Amino acid sequence: MALIVQKYGGTSVGDVDRIRNVAKRVLKTQAAGHQVVVVVSAMSGETNRLVDLANKISKDPDGREYDQLVSTGEQVTIALLALAIRDLGGQARSFLGHQVRITTDSAFSKARIKSIDASVIHDDLAKNHVVVVAGFQGIDPEGNITTLGRGGSDTTAVALAAALKADCEIYTDVDGVYTADPRVVPNAKKLDKISYEEMLELASLGAKVLQIRSVEMAMKYKVPLWVKTSFEEVEGTVVTTEDKDMEKIVVSGVSADKNEAKIAVRRLADRPGIASQLFESLAGANINVDMIIQNVSEDGFTDLTFTIPKTDLKNALRLAESVGKEIGAGKVESADNIAKVSIVGVGMRSHSGVAAKMFTTLAQEKINIQMISTSEIKISVVVDDKQADAAVKALHKAFIG
Amino acid sequence: MALIVQKYGGTSVGDVDRIRNVAKRVLKTQAAGHQVVVVVSAMSGETNRLVDLANKISKDPDGREYDQLVSTGEQVTIALLALAIRDLGGQARSFLGHQVRITTDSAFSKARIKSIDASVIHDDLAKNHVVVVAGFQGIDPEGNITTLGRGGSDTTAVALAAALKADCEIYTDVDGVYTADPRVVPNAKKLDKISYEEMLELASLGAKVLQIRSVEMAMKYKVPLWVKTSFEEVEGTVVTTEDKDMEKIVVSGVSADKNEAKIAVRRLADRPGIASQLFESLAGANINVDMIIQNVSEDGFTDLTFTIPKTDLKNALRLAESVGKEIGAGKVESADNIAKVSIVGVGMRSHSGVAAKMFTTLAQEKINIQMISTSEIKISVVVDDKQADAAVKALHKAFIG
């Protein structure tokens, strides 16, 4: 007997019939002798409906009220799933974030989980109940409802699996992790296995299968993470610790991320502490900066370019302009027609020449590289967003086939 | 400066524009120097949408999950109203039942409020915030979400007013309490003032302006209760303690309730303890019995007839049949094509002949009386539901004009 946390996304619970299908799948897992905790997202379209209401009523919705509003989507789904399971003869109870004490910090709309009280869940599992938990939401120390950001239900599932020492299965509308987006590269292949590190790079690079924080958390607590589809009975991809086999593959995935924007601050004084003022102000506003590039100094000044999520562009630009004025910098420019294209693979560690081959491949396609960033197992370039698909196709052909 | 609890129903917050109107009205009250706590219902149609989902997924929805589901309606509205108030430059924070510790018993879907922790609200009011509280919901001692039953937002508002020692204004789509339903009796008059006792009888008799439990609670804690409309600037009706003026009016209202059904149990043994078995079993299922009539015993047997809400008919009938079998009773019969027509007035206490005049009036209209029930300030009769409107018209003409 195993303890399994299953997470079903918005399309898997998109209507009454699909919720009933999830209930059947859950009861089948339980009938096979397992204890099951289920985490669900809002029914597809529901979160957007709520966000639209907020935006209709307020130009700049307050974070606390926004979270109070959007967290209702998951509340509806957990109750309906528990009802569906009971209607099929099973036993189930649903729980909100605060009912299983999923405590978070107070960063509304992007809160981080600090602790979970697993005792309530263990009590219910001991009674042979299916435990249904609302994804995406928690409660801060003052009792305010918080949400974890888009895709936060994955994080809820992994956090629960870590707290319960369980396996975690993420059910989604794709049947696993691919070497590239199959809509862009038709001969992309499904991976049986991928390391946390690679998945982390792919997730952060726009392969939308898993939310990045859920992978980070799975890696930290060594939670085996299965990516599966709820629409078919096929094996998915397991995300797990790196093994010998994986090292032989140089590039395991190619991805494109079109959700970033870039900001350039011109003629910054090239002395210690200048960049930190800027990035501390962005961090204070909870804006995640991704790539940062600083040119070599000329006549005591330098240009600084960085990327941030497109949704944060307005805020980030305002902050950059205000800090720029304080520290006597030059113009602040921005662009949102960019895409970040990346190749990822643990094998890169022991193979040289990968970067050279990547740049040559792009040059042959006449794709201009605007920014470059590398890590041990990844190389990313920023290109014009209209050339992103062509770049992914060429790189997949060159490295994977 | 006064502390005022305002409650807005579903039609008053039916869409984004109406929510913005409520926000304006609230800020106007605050600008006049008052502290304001607002209680809101779900947007009109929303609770029905959620109930439909529950009924689509389950033949007999579990109470706990049902409440988890339907309580989301009010959560959406409080967040939107707080956003609207902030968007207009005000300060507001929204609170769920559990966030202001509205604790209830565990009778799901018809829970009763046991206590409220007003400290959080006082803290926010002291900061000049508008406090927006979700109506209809609470939390039981085990941390389960509960709801107070249809119209429960009125009860939330009055309970808050009692806890805060505030006045209570109930905004609805009618502009006050009338001597009869104006759709049935076109010359029905709006009352400036009505006693708690009369309002209680009218509320329990189907005048849908206020939920009965909210009036009970207002009477118990002597909370002045204003019934107003949010669509116009007109004076409403105040529900308050009885005064000398009121006593002069014999009948202050005529009402009809078409939401009851009757059950008759035939040939019950006429000995102590028989009726109690039946009614204890109904009470155990949280079914409110309204009128009870037992005929004089013949040959040691009697017939017992009682009325219950139409929605509880199926359950009540099952219980009555099962208890009837146990105690060796005869046939159990039921009908739901009935209406209860009532006249209400504190003046009845000191006037005789009111019942006689009522029965004569109905006889002249050839309306057959199936059951009769009286209290100090009310006389109710059960008639065929097709004759209910005619009965109301005739009684209004005879007693009020």
Image: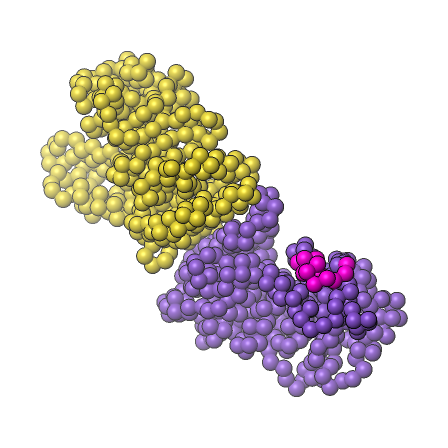
Chain colours: A purple, B yellow
Relative to residue A341, is residue A218 drawn left or right? left
Instruction: Give me the residue at 44% from left, 48% from top.
Output: B127
B398 with respect to A386 (left or right): left
Q: Residue at x 41, y 17 (%)?
A: B186
Question: Is residue A132 rendered to the left or right of residue B190?
Answer: right
Q: Residue at x 49, y 40 (%)?
A: B43
Residue B147, position as x, y percentages in the image = 38, 47
Residue A363 visible in this rendered orientation of the protein: yes
Give whichever of A271, B122 is nearer the camera.
A271
The kind of secondary structure the magenta stretch mainly shows is helix
The percent position of residue A117, horizontal first and vertical second, equals 42, 68
Residue closest to the eye, A327 or A39: A327
- From the viewer's side, name the closer residue of A8 and B268: A8
Residue A327 highlighted magenta (yes or no): yes
Span of residues in magenta: A319-331
Residue B145, horizontal then vertical, whole percent: 39, 53
Location of the C terminus of chain A by quadrant is bottom right
Relative depth, front residue between B85 and B135: B85
Q: Is residue A88 visible?
A: no
Q: Is residue A330 left or right of residue B185?
A: right
Q: Quadrant of residue B387?
A: top left
Q: Is residue A62 above or below residue A107?
A: above
Whether B137 is among the magenta residues is: no
